[in-house]
Image (tube, helix red, strand yellow):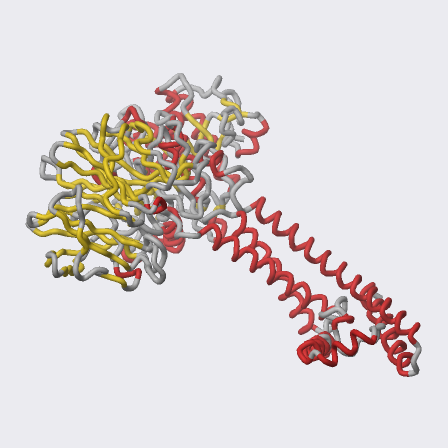
Amino acid sequence: MKWWQHNRNHYYHQHHYNHNSNSSGNSNSASGGGGGGGRVVAAGFVFCLVCFVINGLIAVLYGWLILTPPVSLNERKGLPWLGCQEDNEGSWAIGVFFGQSPFSLKPIETTEIWRNESAAWPVANPVITCASASDSGFPSNFVADPFLYVQGDVFYLFYETKNSFTMQGDIGVAKSIDKGATWQQLGIALDEEWHLSYPYVFNYLGQIYMMPESSQKGELCLYRVTNFPLEWELDRVIMKKPLIDSFIIDHNGEYWLFGSEHSSFGTTNGRLEIWYSSSPLGPWKPHKKNPIYNTYRSFGARNGGRPFRYNGNLYRIGQDCGETYGRRVRIFKVEVLSRVDYKEVEVPFPFEESSKGRNAWNGARYHHLDVQQLKSGEWVGVMDGDRVPSGDSVHRFLLGCASVAAVSGLILLLGVLLGAVNCIIPLNWCADYSGKRSDTLIAWERANVFSSKLRRVFSRLNRVPSFLRSWIKPNTFAGRSVLTLIFALGVALSCTGVTFIYGGSGAEEPYSWKGQFSQFTLLTMTYDARLWNLKMFVNHYSRCASVKEILVVWNKGIPPKVSDLNSAVPVRIRVEDLNSLNNRFKVDPLIKTRAVLELDDDIMMPCDDIERGFMLWRQHPDRIVGFYPRYVDGSRLEYSGEKYARKNKGYNMILTGAAFMDSQVAFERYWSEQARPGREVVDKYFNCEDVLMNFLYANASSSKTVEYVRPAWAIDTSKLSSAAISRDTNVHYKIRSECLRKFSDMYGSMSGRRWEFDSRKDRWDV
């Protein structure tokens, strides 16, 4: 007999005995009944505790195996430990955009700016992050609200940076001499005892002014530069109002101040007010229609950056805060602006939002834009963006707690069905409880109607266990199925709770190198028998943060339509005339990035592993950087798997079925005249193209030519079908051993080349 069944029988016996004894006035027996109830509560508690511990251990194991390795975000991303802490306000960053008009802005990566000395090919957004400020000695949790000030060919960028220690906003400044490709952090331009943001910078009569938001102080202050760009002094208080996100614009001979005041009751991000003056220095008079707007926060009333003129029209930028704070920017054309009237209409803003979700730096929201026209006629814009909505960390914590609470409820239900828990509410809370009660307590209960009703509810609730056990019998197949389902649901909710609380925002972010980001082309080779695999492949990897484009090399059969593939990035299908593995490395002038990730369509791994490999390749672009190491013994010349490399504690080859390489150097090397005999061997065996590439790299350099990155996990989906050339391992290895002998004769031996595992500081090669 199970221990909880024994306890249940004991409880029923005791309770029945005590009830009869109480009827005859035996108070001692009643006391004994209370003791029996205590033992039942203890037994149920132990059962629940044991189940909860079991669920917890499973959840911890899940977190260890599936979630991000147990290191801090800063260690994992190589971020400065003083800054870039998770912040409930978000993880804002800043990007640069270019276009022929303010309505045709494209991110900087589309301009294909290559800066070899910065190890980014090409430069990609975001160009300024919390790490940019923190690495310069100014710890920051995020950067936002960017405003440009252009002097000739030099860009100065003023922005809010949230101090990681004071948790308030300061005004930072950065400088670029190459049109925003790289930025030098100059420092903090303005630091007050109150929160600062929205640093609206403008020129008036040869003087440079800054009007940041300082609503926490309750005033709108104007600062004048004394030593550009880092030294400013308070010029005057423009208005004794806590205005937020304000700007000043010269229009029709007068100056107009737009801002929002949220200090009064009932005001939201849907409020906008206007003042006018003959000078930007004031005094200011309110518009007759103030507040111009006091409507829904999704309307775009709150300012979202500097207004601009285009084709003779004035445009205002507003924030749509409907779904979350700062969800997107909206553009309004100002049709009427006078002392007595104001009218604007929204115009389309064809800004292409990323389909990568939280993996994109601005995938969740973007709420500020400053766009200006350069002397060349080109337009430049700076915009902030975030990968998580406002309040995300609190939201995740609450969901995690709710999951844990649900697990507790399921454990209680499981205990009830198994008979381990016999009373949901302690007996002394119930109206028919037979324990001793004083006359004073009984008199109070009679007088207190609510207490009596509550006890009756508790008493009825305690009848639920017997009802459920009569409905679901654990010793039947249906009963066991229900119990199994409840347990499985509890485990799933436990893992869900761990994911919400400890799993982060769900974003698999890119890694910066020397403060910059870049992008790569993902190249895979396939044919018609693996179309199902290709669809899954594209759907997953297109959402990795640094993937710019996916190139599908189609070797055989009728190719799919691009519209058949669910992709967050452009997909190009290159149809080959000849079914050859050499097509994998064919020179392709349409590839727009220096980095190419060659990845077999049957390999699935996390985007985070891909991003780690990409950062490592940017450190060593002259090498093959990949995820599958092999060791070729120069004397043995027999192909073996990774176990052989581990046994020899080193590697000298990386399989190019999952590897980064230089698209120009590698492909031209593979299609050189020197490599022609090797390509013929590849066509003869329909195998070994990756082995050949490793020999070509080794032949071209006496230094290290390969780097290994260990993936957290990887799944070979070819095991689910017969469409794979390596399904017969013995035959596959025999062919590759023959290739090793032939390539050694052609290009020299691998003897003397071996690089140890776990030789780097990042420990990604363990």
Quarter of the image with the C terminus is top right
Q: Quadrant of residue 375?
A: top left
As displayed, is residue 295 above or below residue 548? below
Residue at 54% across / 55% down in the picture?
Answer: 400
Q: Is there any visible trace of residue 442 in the rendered image?
A: yes
Out of 14 and 198, give the one closest to the viewer: 198
Residue 696 lies in quadrant: top left
Query: Which residue does the image show at 72% across and 70% down from the upper left?
Result: 425
Q: Quadrant of the N terminus?
A: bottom right
Which residue is at 83% across, 76% downward?
439
Can you give x and y, in whole percent of width and height, for residue 649 in the image?
56, 25
Q: Is residue 533 left or right of residue 320?
A: right
| Residue 490: percent from left, percent from top | 62, 61
Residue 590 in view here? no
Q: Quadrant of residue 689?
A: top left
Question: Is residue 188 left or right of 731 when viewed as pictured?
Answer: left
Q: Nearer the viewer, residue 323 or 53?
A: 323
